[in-house]
Amino acid sequence: MRGVIAILLSVALLLGGGTQRAAQPDEASSSDDRPALRMSPAQLVAIIDETGRGNYITSCVDILLDLEIKRIRLYASKPTDAVGTHRIEDYRVEVVYRPEWQDLERRAAGLYHLMYDGRVREFACASVAEGRRSFGLGLLKLCLRVDPEWAFTHPTGYEIVKLADLVQALERGEKWATEVVEAEAEQWRILVHKYKPRLSGQTGSSSGKEKGRGGPRSSGAH
């Protein structure tokens, strides 16, 4: 299952300190004077939360911008024959693969690519709930080709939902699956209302904590 949350997140600012160059992934620290080591667990968790929150907000804005031009991305961390460009009705869906993401998903929290993939899942579920069943199911099935083990947190609780089970249940018309996609659709409507991009010099701000709805796959986002 992708996106297991680690306790500590390697934040470049913390490891590098101030405006110094951030430590490289394969570069050992020569001392123990890194700022992160002087922080309390509560401070580190707060930084992890805010990093994830920032990635979540950006993923919301990005997918809404992408949908404006009928483009969607899916990020694969494991080899898959789905890599490349697909057409699902009038949308161009690009599946991008990077092997480095798989290791990061085991050790890091709040990763952007998982946040974005989680928003794709919400959009697909919302499409099913709102009458574009063929399109939504097609997109969900492509998500499964990207990651057959894709799982996420139930929108109304903490139960883990396997995407493969959801797709099969939707095809069989099972009630619980309909309830899940309707709950996902509600999350999507909130996202659209809150994060619709401002492209005409508008200003504004949002406050409060966003809870990413991606569950395990999205590192507390996916």
Image: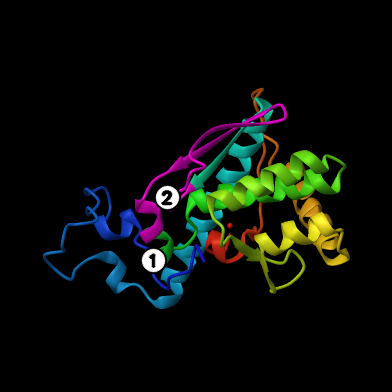
Q: Amino acid at mark 2?
A: Pro
Q: Secondary structure at mark 2?
A: loop
Q: Residue at x 67, y 50 (%)?
A: 121
Label of residue 79 in the image: 2
In the rendered image, residue 145 lying in the magenta stretch gets the answer no
Residue 193 vs 118, above or below: the answer is above
**Quadrant location of the C terminus?**
bottom right
* Left or right: 147, with 67 as reference point: left
Relative to the observer, which residue lies in front, 215 or 168?
Answer: 168
Give the number of the mark in front: 1 or 2: 2
Residue 178: percent from left, percent from top: 85, 59
Q: Residue at x 42, y 50 (%)?
A: 79
Q: Residue at x 27, y 65 (%)?
A: 35
The reply to whether residue 148 is in sight is yes
Relative to the observer, which residue lies in front, 148 or 191?
Answer: 148
Q: Which residues are magenta?
A: 76-103
Residue 65: percent from left, percent from top: 63, 31
The residue under label 1 is 107
* Left or right: 47, with 192 as reference point: left
* Left or right: 106, with 52 as reference point: left
Q: Residues within 10 Å of mark 1 (few under 14, many from 20)?
A: some
* Left or right: 207, with 16 as reference point: right
Label of residue 89 in the image: none
Residue 221: percent from left, percent from top: 58, 59
